[in-house]
Every structure is written in structure tokens, then in C-alpha cells.
């Protein structure tokens, strides 16, 4: 029997929280570059009553993305997308961050948008980090939003001499994610589907722990200590937002990015974090 299919990329805490909140009764195709981790998360969810198919995939490869989409279509119409795959500034070099977080996300949104079913919805995980970099020019924003995906990494603003470090690369990738959501939501809308982004702040995950223990650890700890919420967030809180965006209750929301950072960005510009910025 054909069922609604949900593609989930990135077998991490945020992806799993969203899949658990929204994936019941659906066929979930879970993609991750780490095959063992993907199979482990798939088993945890299967043991909890979900129907999960693990799939080894590389977000930086169009061929790998297309193979995952083809696998998902074997089970029915693709109606949902949750993209939580990516690497952090402390986990990878500049080239990898741009290839995975920027290019790979753009390709995924493009390719899923070609087959997403009517009434479908997608959520991609961005980051508050993209909100803390200087504004780009309107032309640069348009390039990130609308340049053909195979030309993205050739843009002048993404060349090595224009990227300061891994954090800057990550910020550029996340800015691109959000602009790309605005661009692609128009294409998704032609198929009767919606697409949005969530920009989390400091969320307690293994990726966040890498950041806490990395060269910018003190900066991040200070950030959540001095944000209005006074604490880091949880993956389940991101799932609360995704549940709205992917349900009929969010039917009028598309092309948007929901900043969910406990007020850290506000504090960065207008509160106690601004003197440290």
C-alpha cells in the first residue's frame, strides 16, 4: 500500500526529534553519511513504532541526493522533507562546510521540489549564526537565492580570499539556506507545497558539544548565559516549531525562517552580548 513518504536527512538529535513528532504513520527514509549512525537511529525509531528505512547518503553529492529521492519514491509520494544534515565550524574545513551546508542543501531543496506531492511541506535547519554577520548587498543575496546550484560555489563572495574562517563559511552557508528557502518556496508552491526554515540557537546536541569544546566554546557558553532565555534550547523545542510548519495549522506559512535562539540574536545586537560582539 502506498503511503506518504517523509525524507529526513541527518541522523542527529534535531532531525530525530522532528521525525518522532511528525513522522508517525508515514514511511520515513532516513539519510546520513555515517551508515552506522543512520542504522542506529533507524533502529531506535523502529523499536518505538515508526517505519524507518536507513539510507547512506552524502549531502554534498547530487548523485547521492538523487539516489535517496529515488529510494523514497519506491514507497509512495514524497510529501515531507526534514533536512537536518550538516557540519559545524569546529567539525570541518571551509571547503567542506560550503560543499555540504550551502551547496548540498540547495541541491536537496531543488531536487525534492521537483517531486514533492501536492499538500506537501518541507523544513530545513538553518542557524542563528547567519543572523550575526554583516548584511550582504541585494545582488549578493539574490545570487545566494537564485544562482543555478552548480554555479553557487563559483560565486565571488564564496571564494577562499573572501571567506575569513570556518565560522564565516558557516554563516554564509546559513544565510544561503534561508535565501534559498525563499527562492525555492516559489517553485514548491507551483506544486501546491510549502517550504520553510528553522534557525536554531544553541541546542544541546553532540554537534553543540563539539562547539562548546572548540575554539569558540567560551563565546557560545556566554551567548546562552546572557540571552533572555538564560539557557540553551532542546531538540524537542525545535520539533514544536516544525510540527506547526508541517501541519495544516501552518498552511499560510511558506518561504519563512523561524529564528528560535532564546533571544540570543536580540541580545547580540541590543543587549549584554553586544559589547562582546
Image: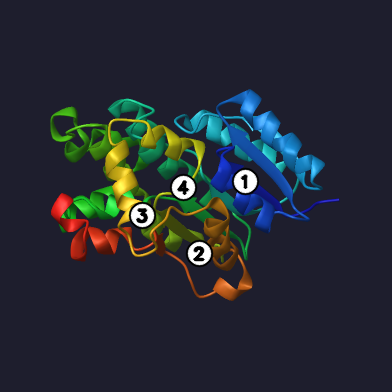
In the picture of the structure, the residue carrying the numbered disc 4 is 110
Percent position of residue 147, x then y: 30, 46
Indicate which disc, 3 or 4, sits on the residue closer to the N terminus.
4
Single out the mark in the foreground, 3 or 4: 3
**Mark 4 touches mark 2? (CB < 8 Å):** no
Indicate which disc, 1 or 3, sits on the residue closer to the N terminus.
1
Label 3 neighbour load within 10 Å: few <14, some 14-19, many 20+: many
Q: Is residue 126 above or below residue 86?
A: below
Task: Find residue 178 and name its label.
Answer: 3
Q: CA distance from mark 4 to mark 2?
A: 13 Å
In the picture of the structure, the residue carrying the numbered disc 1 is 16
Single out the mark in the foreground, 1 or 3: 1
Q: CA distance from mark 1 to mark 3?
A: 21 Å
Query: Which quadrant holds residue 166?
Result: top left
The kind of secondary structure element at disc 3 is helix
Q: CA distance from mark 4 to mark 1?
A: 23 Å
Q: CA distance from mark 2 to mark 1?
A: 29 Å
Q: Is residue 226 above or below residue 244?
A: above
Q: Is residue 183 above or below residue 252?
A: above
Indicate which disc, 2 or 1, sits on the residue closer to the N terminus.
1
Percent position of residue 237, x then y: 54, 59
In the picture of the structure, the residue carrying the numbered disc 2 is 190
Residue at (78% x, 41% y) in the render: 46
Indicate which disc, 4 or 1, sits on the residue closer to the N terminus.
1
Amino acid at each position: 500500500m502506498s503511503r506518504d513518504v517523509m525524507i529526513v536527512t541527518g541522523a542527529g538529535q534535531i532531525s530525530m526529534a522532528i521525525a518522532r513528532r511528525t513522522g508517525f504513520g508515514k514511511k520515513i527514509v532516513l539519510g546520513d553519511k555515517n551508515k552506522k549512525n543512520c542504522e542506529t537511529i533507524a533502529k531506535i525509531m523502529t523499536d518505538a513504532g515508526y517505519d524507518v528505512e536507513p539510507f547512506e547518503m552524502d549531502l554534498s553529492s547530487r548523485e547521492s541526493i538523487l539516489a535517496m529521492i529515488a529510494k523514497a519514491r519506491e514507497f509512495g509520494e514524497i510529501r515531507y522533507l526534514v533536512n537536518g544534515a550538516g557540519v559545524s565550524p569546529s567539525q570541518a574545513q571551509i571547503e567542506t562546510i560550503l560543499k555540504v551546508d550551502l551547496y548540498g542543501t540547495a541541491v536537496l531543496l531543488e531536487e525534492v521540489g521537483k517531486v514533492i506531492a501536492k499538500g506537501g511541506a518541507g523544513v530545513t535547519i538553518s542557524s542563528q549564526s547567519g543572523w550575526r554577520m554583516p548584511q550582504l548587498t541585494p545582488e549578493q543575496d539574490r545570487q545566494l537565492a537564485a544562482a543555478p546550484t552548480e554555479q553557487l560555489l563559483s560565486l565571488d563572495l564564496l571564494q577562499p580570499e573572501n571567506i575569513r574562517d570556518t565560522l564565516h563559511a558557516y554563516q554564509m552557508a546559513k544565510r544561503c539556506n534561508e535565501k534559498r528557502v525563499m527562492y525555492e518556496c516559489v517553485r514548491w508552491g507551483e506544486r501546491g507545497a510549502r517550504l520553510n526554515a528553522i534557525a536554531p540557537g544553541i541546542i544541546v546536541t553532540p554537534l553543540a558539544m563539539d562547539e562548546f569544546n572548540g575554539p569558540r566554546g567560551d563565546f557560545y557558553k556566554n551567548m546562552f548565559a546572557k540571552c533572555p532565555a538564560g539557557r540553551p534550547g532542546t531538540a524537542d523545542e525545535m520539533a514544536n516549531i516544525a510540527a506547526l510548519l508541517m501541519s495544516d495549522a501552518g498552511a499560510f506559512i511558506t518561504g519563512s525562517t523561524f529564528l528560535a535562539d532564546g533571544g540570543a540574536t536580540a541580545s547580540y545586537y541590543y543587549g549584554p552580548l553586544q559589547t562582546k560582539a
